[in-house]
Image (cartoon, helix red, strand yellow):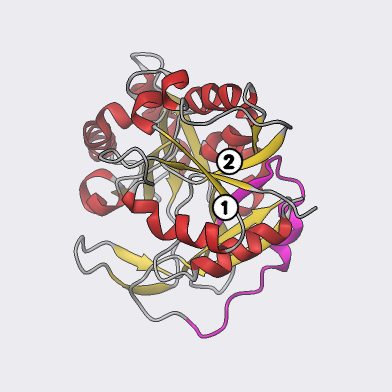
Amino acid sequence: MPKQLYILFCESPLNRNKVDPDFESEFLSATENGFCTLLFNFDELVDNKDAELATKRIKPNGTLTDVVYRGWMLTPDQYSTLYHNLLAKNYRLINNKIEYQNCHYLPDSLKFISAHTPKTIFESASSESFINTLIAEAKAFGSQPIIIKDYVKSEKHHWQTACFVSQASNTAKLKETIDNLIRLRGDYLNEGIVIREFLELSDLTIHSKSGMPLKEEYRLFFCHKKLIGIYNYWEEGEYLASKPDTEGFEVLAQGITSNFFSMDIARQKNGNLIIIELGDGQVSGIPDHTDQNEFYKNLWSCLP
């Protein structure tokens, strides 16, 4: 009997019988490569906190089967709610809540990649004094340049005002940058703030809209510890014809507690490759100009 594999997509906000337009090409590639598809209402889950309504069009399955989500980012708690709601219908998301958070939140990823990624400190936004605590801890960077982000995302397209600080010791600039990041992220701020050592990476080009410097970065996807694809991260700039050697990263991936995750890597100016961050593979975007048919073909081949 041929295997049945499922991909869960978000519904279109305007037509609940169709996939969200932003994922339409992925939906087509998934179906062309043999996947069955499920749709749920993202807004009902996230905004209305109603998982039952969000998944009401998903009928219970006769036997327990695995499903891979491909859609918008969820908090770990939102993901857990979706996980247990689907499990009650005999659909099991490929990662549980802990496995999701392991790669979704950078601080959780550090236990796997700390020796291969820039020096990092972080503080949860759970206390009123967390910014002051973080600024005090930033003294560990001395006068080095640093990057500011939340636990998941940066405001890299506001590079000079909400992301990059040329000297960590400039506490006034550091606080201003953190404040700008928090303001821009608004209700979408993920958990807390991360400060990272800024390392000189191999230049690619300058972003045509934001003016942000683009570096030689790649996104890798792993499923059940197997590398299923390596893709140029940026659509602008001239990449080398050959992709970097991934053997060391494939070895490292064996120790990461997740069944489906992404790994962003970059080349330093000295030629060494480093890990920028991990991401849960279900909510990590496939870089522009990627052959999505190849992605879903490789995903199919590594799923049981």
- Residue 281 shows in the view: no
> Mark 2 Cα within 10 Å, few/some/many (few <14, many 20+)?
many
Q: Amino acid at mark 1?
A: Ser
Q: Nearer the viewer, residue 16 or 208?
A: 16
236 vs 98, left or right, is left
Is residue 188 visible to us here?
yes
Q: Position of residue 67 (x, y in %)?
A: 62, 41
How many numbered marks, from 0 up?
2
Which residue is rendered at x = 23% and y = 40% of the image? 173
Name above or below for residue 151 compared with residue 83: below
Q: Residue furthest right?
A: 1
Q: In the picture, residue 209 is in which quadrant?
A: bottom left
Q: Quadrant of residue 17?
A: top left
Q: Is residue 47 magenta?
A: no
Give, as a three-letter code, the residue at label 2. Answer: Cys
Residue under numbered circle 2:
103
* Region in magenta: 240-263
Q: Residue at x 52, y 26 (%)?
A: 82
300 relative to 280 in the view: left or right: right
Cα distance in 3D space between marks 1 and 2: 8 Å
State yes or no: discs 1 and 2 in contact (Cβ < 8 Å). Answer: yes
- Compared to residue 268, the image places residue 137 above or below, namely above
- Residue at 51 percent across and 85 percent down: it is 241
Q: Earlier in the sequence, mark 1 or mark 2?
A: 2
Question: In the structure shown, which secondary structural element does the residue marked by tag 2 occupy?
Answer: helix
Identify the residue under disc 1: 262
161 or 190: nearer the viewer: 190
Q: Is residue 45 above or below residue 66?
A: above
Residue 230 bears which disc, if any?
A: none
